[in-house]
Amino acid sequence: MKSLRIVASELWYQQLAYWRNPMGAFFTFFMPVMFLVIFASLYSGDRYQGLKLDQYFIPGIMTFGVISACYTNLSVTLANQREQGILKRFRGTPLPPWAYMVATVASCVIRALVLVALTLGVGVAFYGLVVPAHSYGAIAAIVVLGAATFCALGVAITVIIPNADAAPAIVNGVYLPLMFISGTFFPLSSSSVLAKIASYFPIRPFVLASYNAMNPRVHTDLIHAIWLENLAIWCVVAFVFAVRRFSWLPRRRS
């Protein structure tokens, strides 16, 4: 119970600090909605597998929001805090290091859940997105597993970031190409070379699992387990790597 109170207290302060930066919070939540509106305008009237194309790319935008909150923001934030010596100073406080990390990850997951609710809400209200009632449990499980996977990857990639200035370039350099070859914003044929390459990475399985969970023509029992297995494997590998290699100390500068 004491450990839970420590984590809850740190999480509360992190949430306060985040929401007291309204411009940062605004653009975090504005970007996915902006992409949703742009692609809805571009794909207006188009269809995919007999459904409105909105039914495909809105789940893709949802995954984009989760990845942005749990991978991009987390990795850049941790890299900056490490190089500024903030993480080192936390190690000298009574707050256990694991409690700080759990609270930091939980804070990112909360933002991801808000993004999911916002994206799906806009999709249902304005673009005719259909979310079958029987798929709510599957969607929740996919989002939780996806958030856990990309949080683990966000912490793990800080190991190869040499300094704070390089953080955005390295994080986006890995993330953005995979977003496009994974069919996040538009359908991609499963037989294409790019789709086959992307299937080994976690973004495409996350996108396809989310799309099928919201596809009214697909029962949730038929969602391919291999996509969820891919996410789970990446989550475990990234978590083990992060636990073993994550550094709280700034890198030595030449």
Image (cartoon, helix red, strand yellow):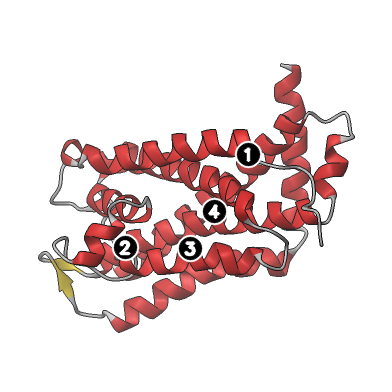
Name the residue nearer the viewer: 128 or 10: 10
Residue 192 makes an appearance in the image: yes
Q: Which amino acid type is marked by label 3? A: Val
Work out how far the residue at label 2 is from the one at label 1, CA to CA, in angstroms.
28 Å
SS for dot 3: helix
Q: In x, y percent, where is residue 140?
A: 39, 40
Instruction: Name the residue carrying label 3.
Output: 174
Task: Please identify the quadrant where the C terminus is shown.
Answer: bottom right
The residue shown at (35%, 77%) is 39
Work out how far the residue at label 4 is from the one at label 3, CA to CA, in angstroms.
11 Å
The residue shown at (39%, 65%) is 179
Q: Which amino acid type is marked by label 1? A: Arg
Q: Nearer the viewer, mark 3 or mark 1?
A: 1
Q: In x, y percent, where is residue 70?
A: 55, 51
Work out how far the residue at label 3 is from the one at label 1, CA to CA, in angstroms.
19 Å
Reading the chain from its start, which is encountered first: label 2 or label 1? 2
SS for dot 4: helix
Instruction: Name the residue carrying label 1.
Output: 245
Instruction: Name the residue carrying label 4.
Output: 71
